[in-house]
Image: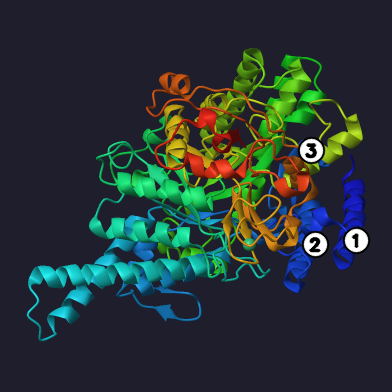
Amino acid sequence: MQLSTVSEKTTDHLLHALTEIVESSNQDLIQENANVDGQSPMGQMSKFASETAKHYAKTEMLSEEVTEAIEANFIHPHDLDFMPTGTTTCCQIPLGAILKGGFNTGHGYMREPNDICSAMALSSIIFQSNQNMQHGGQSYPMFDYDLAPYVHKTHRKHLKRLRSYPTKWTDTEIDELAWKETDRDVYQACEAFIHNCNSMHSRGGGQVPFVSINYGTDTSPEGRLLIDNLLRATKAGLGNGETPIFPIQIFKMKKGTNYEPGEPNYDLYQLALETTAKRLFPNFSFIDSSVNVQHYDGTPESEVSYMGCRTRVMANRHGDDNSIQRGNLSFTSINLVKIALTSQTKDQFFDKLGYYTDLVVKQLLERYAFQVKKQAQHFSFLYGQNVWKNSEDLAPTDTLEEVLKQGTLSVGFIGLAEALVALIGEHHGESDEAYDLGYEIVSFMRSRVDAAADTNDLNFSLIATPAEGLSGKFTKRDQETFGKIPGVTERTFYTNSFHVPVYYNIRAIDKIKREGAFHKLCNGGHISYIECDGDVSKNTKALDVLVKSMAANDFGYGSINHPVDRCMECGYTGIIDNECPKCHTSDDEKVERIRRITGYLVGDMKKWNTAKRAEESQRVKHQQSANLKDALSDSGASGPADFGGTEVSEAGTLGAKRSTCGDLRHREPETSESISGENTNLANESNGRFACE
Ligand SMILES: [Zn+2]
């Protein structure tokens, strides 16, 4: 393909896209991002900018070979619209260090806070400030450890004040009272923090920052008090009881700390289960998994921390193996399905896969070469406030070669399942042969990526792509070329990364086993979802079993999906089928249904793009008997007996709009009461049924 042809094509495309924004005529374009109202003025302006910048990147910045591969639908560089700005994706922010010295937002200096309320208010501001520096997510890797000193300060303040009163209280009484007042302050601080995360706008386009927090292992009284209150405030929800969309919360599981009864933070883990049952967060990460334990040296800093969507940054060729002050620089995904569809033999497939993996490496390097030429002063908060590793050594006009090598460059992939069907007629949920080939494919990519890391002495990694915007794009183009091939291109979406397809019936435990094996291969990030169809809020033991099964099957990071509905008429939160159980309204417009897309919660399905809507509507729910005892004896976890009614549905999305699709055969609302308390025999309960994403 000639460059001039590409250029003309993209110019036409640009004008067409701008018109579609003006007319709001293309849902997929204006709702590429489900967290933005694409029809609002700032949403539109942001979209104009995005389409124009993408055009610039395509015509002026990418090399010919790369442009051809994009045009031919083999690869997709993510956030291409941000390429001309030289931004990087995300960062794990050293909250403790920034609070300790105070910081400058660019509009004024913030002193070190003296209590937890100020500390958490500033935590929101740090998120907001850094979000304007980057195009991906923002995360705190050790939220409990970093904020515990401010809980301590708050307690000291209360002690001092109480001691100044002329009373006959004993020291013990004063101390107890001080803790009680601290507890109240911490709750209010957590409540305010959550509200801030769901209301402060950033990124200039009417979006709240994409923020995540990792916690769960600090066993100090202060750290524990913080997480206890954070979870309780999350459970309580926002002002009208709404489910908070942000921050994405990640509870770090660690044997000896919070895994079994008797361990110091086991109670917080139990509270985390109750909270996720009601609010879909926290997710769970696993420090002891093979991919994460290799970097763990006993310090909080070496505990794995994830960006909520799944990005993981740990290994480091240029410093300590941890996430702190580091993040992803950019990532690009490979369309495995197209490679499979254009290969006659397995060998040809691997040849092509090798070619496109290497090409993506080349493209990431080209983007990197542009990124490092930016100056520290262009990203005043990220580098001026020492958010990014080693940036304290930079002068404002210094370029970024020395600091950006701390980040990762990631190769991603989409549609392993459909690629396998194209190659051998089955996907990795269906047969061991397909599973082995799937494992071979992902291992092949990983070894190629590792080789690129050695050759270039940069932190290349393999990421299991979160495919929100991309899931439909690749598929639509391939359908135009190949038509609707059963099991391959017949749907409007490809399955995320290594996930077993959403439309395939498989026992939850089998899905956990099949997907768990892929986590360690995807060192740049991974997540698997287990979906429960039913009200799990009264059965946290079942959730405990799921989390333990994830741990036993070497998950790095997992999450549990289940329906969370809220009646906007009366505020009822729970499962709402055809009518609200409390006020009996049957108006579906009055029901908010929270669902998860590629790791982020979305409250309004009107903002979903077509592919995601299709994915959701095509989820097939099936019931199969599954015995938890077998599952657990296989997996090494321990827990209650039968695990029945296992079902599997789509990855990344929660339950269907049950009231509108009328698919209620799996649930009888009245049984939700019966699975409360000690009854963990899910086989008998229609409500305890499990499905995997
Ligand atoms: Zn109601």
Along the viewing direction, whichever of 412 and 553 lies nearer the viewer: 553
Q: Tell me, yes or no, whether the two marked residues, 2 and 3, touch with CB atoms within 8 Å.
A: no
Res. 491 image quadrant: top right
Q: Is residue 114 left or right of residue 520?
A: left
Q: Is residue 647 left or right of residue 315?
A: right
Report the Cα–Cα distance between label 2 and label 3: 20 Å
The residue shown at (84%, 40%) is 476
Say which label, 2 or 3, has the lower sequence index: 2
Q: Tell me, yes or no, whether the two marked residues, 2 and 1, touch with CB atoms within 8 Å.
A: no
Q: Is residue 258 left or right of residue 277?
A: left
Residue 623 in the image, given as x and y percentages of width and height: 64, 27
Residue 314 appears in the figure: no
The residue shown at (70%, 63%) is 590
Compared to 573, does 635 lie above or below?
above
Q: Given the image, on which type of amino acid does mark 3 rest? A: Ala
Q: Which residue matches tag 1? A: 15
Q: Which residue matches tag 3? A: 69
The residue shown at (38%, 50%) is 271
Local crowd size for mark 2, using a 10 Å CA cut-off: few (<14), some (14–19), many (≥20): some
Say which label, 2 or 1, has the lower sequence index: 1
Q: Which residue matches tag 2? A: 52
Local crowd size for mark 3, using a 10 Å CA cut-off: few (<14), some (14–19), many (≥20): some
